[in-house]
Amino acid sequence: MTFANAGTLGTVPGKRDELVARLTMRSPLLEQLGCLAYEVGVNDDEPDTVFVVEIWESAEAHRSSLADPEVQASIASARPLLSGAFGGFRFDIVGSPLRD
Amino acid sequence: MTFANAGTLGTVPGKRDELVARLTMRSPLLEQLGCLAYEVGVNDDEPDTVFVVEIWESAEAHRSSLADPEVQASIASARPLLSGAFGGFRFDIVGSPLRD
Protein backbone atom coordinates (compact mmCIF):
# COMPACT_ATOMS: atom_id res chain seq x y z
CA MET A 1 0.00 0.00 0.00
CA THR A 2 1.46 3.34 -0.99
CA PHE A 3 2.19 5.73 1.82
CA ALA A 4 2.23 9.52 2.07
CA ASN A 5 4.18 11.83 4.33
CA ALA A 6 3.17 15.50 4.33
CA GLY A 7 5.45 17.60 6.49
CA THR A 8 6.56 21.04 7.54
CA LEU A 9 10.16 21.75 8.49
CA GLY A 10 10.83 24.94 10.44
CA THR A 11 14.12 26.57 9.55
CA VAL A 12 16.46 28.93 11.28
CA PRO A 13 15.37 32.42 10.12
CA GLY A 14 16.66 33.16 6.63
CA LYS A 15 17.71 29.57 5.89
CA ARG A 16 14.58 28.42 4.09
CA ASP A 17 15.94 28.69 0.58
CA GLU A 18 19.16 26.92 1.54
CA LEU A 19 17.13 24.00 2.88
CA VAL A 20 15.00 23.99 -0.29
CA ALA A 21 18.17 23.84 -2.39
CA ARG A 22 19.41 20.81 -0.46
CA LEU A 23 16.09 18.98 -0.50
CA THR A 24 15.67 19.43 -4.25
CA MET A 25 19.15 18.22 -5.23
CA ARG A 26 18.69 15.39 -7.74
CA SER A 27 18.70 12.08 -5.87
CA PRO A 28 18.54 8.80 -7.78
CA LEU A 29 19.00 7.14 -4.38
CA LEU A 30 15.53 8.19 -3.22
CA GLU A 31 13.97 6.49 -6.22
CA GLN A 32 16.00 3.38 -5.56
CA LEU A 33 14.67 3.35 -2.01
CA GLY A 34 11.05 3.39 -3.21
CA CYS A 35 10.20 7.08 -3.28
CA LEU A 36 7.53 7.74 -5.94
CA ALA A 37 7.13 11.50 -5.49
CA TYR A 38 8.86 14.14 -3.38
CA GLU A 39 7.57 17.67 -3.82
CA VAL A 40 9.26 20.53 -2.00
CA GLY A 41 7.82 24.00 -1.63
CA VAL A 42 7.34 27.26 0.17
CA ASN A 43 4.54 29.55 1.28
CA ASP A 44 5.43 33.20 1.76
CA ASP A 45 2.90 33.43 4.60
CA GLU A 46 5.32 31.25 6.58
CA PRO A 47 8.75 32.41 5.46
CA ASP A 48 10.78 30.15 7.75
CA THR A 49 9.12 26.89 6.82
CA VAL A 50 9.80 24.35 4.08
CA PHE A 51 6.93 22.11 3.03
CA VAL A 52 7.24 18.60 1.63
CA VAL A 53 4.86 16.00 0.30
CA GLU A 54 6.35 12.55 -0.23
CA ILE A 55 4.79 9.40 -1.67
CA TRP A 56 6.47 6.05 -1.08
CA GLU A 57 5.86 2.52 -2.30
CA SER A 58 5.05 1.56 1.30
CA ALA A 59 5.37 2.80 4.87
CA GLU A 60 8.20 0.29 5.23
CA ALA A 61 10.12 1.79 2.29
CA HIS A 62 9.84 5.21 3.92
CA ARG A 63 10.98 3.88 7.29
CA SER A 64 13.90 2.01 5.76
CA SER A 65 15.03 5.08 3.83
CA LEU A 66 15.58 6.91 7.10
CA ALA A 67 18.12 4.24 8.10
CA ASP A 68 20.09 4.51 4.86
CA PRO A 69 23.59 5.85 5.60
CA GLU A 70 23.51 8.35 2.75
CA VAL A 71 20.10 9.65 3.81
CA GLN A 72 21.25 9.89 7.41
CA ALA A 73 24.33 11.89 6.35
CA SER A 74 22.12 14.21 4.36
CA ILE A 75 19.78 14.74 7.34
CA ALA A 76 22.74 15.37 9.64
CA SER A 77 24.23 17.96 7.31
CA ALA A 78 20.91 19.81 7.07
CA ARG A 79 20.39 19.91 10.83
CA PRO A 80 22.06 23.34 11.35
CA LEU A 81 19.39 24.84 9.06
CA LEU A 82 16.48 23.50 11.12
CA SER A 83 14.71 25.30 13.97
CA GLY A 84 13.42 22.07 15.49
CA ALA A 85 9.78 22.81 14.62
CA PHE A 86 8.22 19.95 12.68
CA GLY A 87 4.63 19.32 11.68
CA GLY A 88 2.51 17.29 9.33
CA PHE A 89 0.92 13.90 9.02
CA ARG A 90 1.29 10.47 7.45
CA PHE A 91 -1.24 8.18 5.90
CA ASP A 92 -1.83 5.07 3.84
CA ILE A 93 -3.15 5.93 0.39
CA VAL A 94 -6.40 4.17 -0.41
CA GLY A 95 -7.37 5.76 -3.72
CA SER A 96 -7.63 8.75 -5.99
CA PRO A 97 -10.48 10.27 -8.03
CA LEU A 98 -7.99 10.62 -10.90
CA ARG A 99 -7.66 6.87 -11.50
CA ASP A 100 -9.88 3.79 -11.48
CA MET B 1 3.81 27.28 -10.58
CA THR B 2 2.32 24.02 -9.36
CA PHE B 3 0.57 24.15 -6.03
CA ALA B 4 0.03 21.60 -3.27
CA ASN B 5 -2.73 21.27 -0.72
CA ALA B 6 -2.19 18.76 2.09
CA GLY B 7 -5.18 18.47 4.36
CA THR B 8 -6.95 16.59 7.10
CA LEU B 9 -10.73 16.32 7.23
CA GLY B 10 -12.27 15.30 10.54
CA THR B 11 -15.35 13.13 10.15
CA VAL B 12 -18.35 12.36 12.28
CA PRO B 13 -17.39 9.17 14.20
CA GLY B 14 -17.71 6.12 11.99
CA LYS B 15 -18.11 8.07 8.75
CA ARG B 16 -14.48 8.01 7.62
CA ASP B 17 -14.84 5.25 5.06
CA GLU B 18 -17.97 6.81 3.61
CA LEU B 19 -16.08 10.06 3.06
CA VAL B 20 -13.15 8.14 1.53
CA ALA B 21 -15.58 6.43 -0.88
CA ARG B 22 -16.95 9.80 -1.99
CA LEU B 23 -13.56 11.45 -2.37
CA THR B 24 -12.16 8.60 -4.45
CA MET B 25 -15.06 8.41 -6.91
CA ARG B 26 -13.59 8.78 -10.41
CA SER B 27 -13.75 12.43 -11.43
CA PRO B 28 -12.67 13.46 -14.92
CA LEU B 29 -13.88 16.95 -13.92
CA LEU B 30 -11.02 17.40 -11.45
CA GLU B 31 -8.49 16.73 -14.20
CA GLN B 32 -10.26 19.20 -16.47
CA LEU B 33 -9.99 21.80 -13.72
CA GLY B 34 -6.21 21.37 -13.48
CA CYS B 35 -5.80 18.76 -10.76
CA LEU B 36 -2.58 16.77 -11.35
CA ALA B 37 -2.78 14.44 -8.34
CA TYR B 38 -5.31 13.78 -5.60
CA GLU B 39 -4.36 11.09 -3.11
CA VAL B 40 -6.81 10.10 -0.40
CA GLY B 41 -5.93 8.04 2.63
CA VAL B 42 -6.35 6.99 6.22
CA ASN B 43 -4.26 6.43 9.32
CA ASP B 44 -5.66 4.03 11.89
CA ASP B 45 -4.06 6.10 14.65
CA GLU B 46 -6.68 8.75 13.81
CA PRO B 47 -9.76 6.74 12.91
CA ASP B 48 -12.09 9.72 12.34
CA THR B 49 -9.87 11.60 9.92
CA VAL B 50 -9.46 11.47 6.15
CA PHE B 51 -6.17 12.70 4.70
CA VAL B 52 -5.67 14.22 1.28
CA VAL B 53 -2.74 15.45 -0.75
CA GLU B 54 -3.62 17.38 -3.88
CA ILE B 55 -1.36 18.82 -6.57
CA TRP B 56 -2.74 21.45 -8.94
CA GLU B 57 -1.42 23.20 -12.03
CA SER B 58 -1.54 26.47 -10.05
CA ALA B 59 -2.99 27.99 -6.90
CA GLU B 60 -5.50 29.72 -9.16
CA ALA B 61 -6.66 26.39 -10.64
CA HIS B 62 -7.25 25.09 -7.12
CA ARG B 63 -9.12 28.24 -6.09
CA SER B 64 -11.27 28.18 -9.23
CA SER B 65 -12.15 24.52 -8.74
CA LEU B 66 -13.81 25.39 -5.43
CA ALA B 67 -16.20 27.70 -7.30
CA ASP B 68 -17.20 25.05 -9.85
CA PRO B 69 -20.91 24.21 -9.39
CA GLU B 70 -20.32 20.46 -9.57
CA VAL B 71 -17.50 20.65 -7.02
CA GLN B 72 -19.65 22.82 -4.76
CA ALA B 73 -22.51 20.31 -4.95
CA SER B 74 -20.12 17.52 -4.06
CA ILE B 75 -18.77 19.46 -1.06
CA ALA B 76 -22.31 20.24 0.10
CA SER B 77 -23.38 16.61 -0.11
CA ALA B 78 -20.35 15.50 1.95
CA ARG B 79 -20.95 18.07 4.67
CA PRO B 80 -23.06 15.77 6.93
CA LEU B 81 -20.05 13.44 7.16
CA LEU B 82 -17.69 16.16 8.43
CA SER B 83 -17.02 17.02 12.07
CA GLY B 84 -15.83 20.53 11.24
CA ALA B 85 -12.19 19.81 12.17
CA PHE B 86 -9.83 20.71 9.35
CA GLY B 87 -6.06 20.90 9.24
CA GLY B 88 -3.16 20.98 6.86
CA PHE B 89 -1.17 23.39 4.77
CA ARG B 90 -0.69 24.73 1.25
CA PHE B 91 2.42 25.60 -0.66
CA ASP B 92 3.91 26.50 -4.01
CA ILE B 93 6.03 23.66 -5.35
CA VAL B 94 9.56 24.74 -6.20
CA GLY B 95 11.21 21.43 -7.05
CA SER B 96 11.77 17.74 -6.44
CA PRO B 97 14.86 15.58 -5.98
CA LEU B 98 13.26 13.09 -8.36
CA ARG B 99 13.55 15.31 -11.43
CA ASP B 100 16.00 17.77 -12.92
Image (tube, coloured by chain):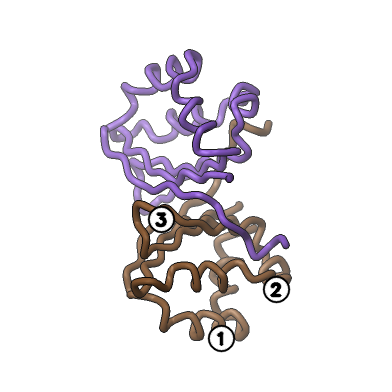
Chain colours: A purple, B brown
Rendering coords of residue A51 (x, y %): 44, 44
Left/right placement of residue B33 relative to residue B90 reads: right
Q: Amino acid at mark 1?
A: Ala
* Label 1: which secondary element: helix
On whether disc 2 and disc 3 are found on a single subunit, the reply is yes
Figure label count: 3
Mark 1 and mark 3: span between their CA atoms? 24 Å
From the image, tell me which residue sits under label 2: B29
Please, which chain is the residue tagged with disc 3 on? B
Residue plotted at (42% across, 73% down): B15
Residue plotted at (34% across, 26% down): A81
Q: Nearer the viewer, mark 1 or mark 3?
A: 1
Mark 1 and mark 2: span between their CA atoms? 13 Å
Rendering coords of residue B49 (x, y %): 39, 63
Q: Amino acid at mark 2?
A: Leu
From the image, tell me which residue sits under label 1: B73
Residue plotted at (50% across, 30% down): A23
From the image, tell me which residue sits under label 3: B89
* Label 3: which secondary element: strand
Please say if the residues under marks 2 and 3 sit with CB atoms less than 8 Å apart. Answer: no
Rendering coords of residue B37 (x, y %): 63, 56
Residue plotted at (39% across, 57% down): B88
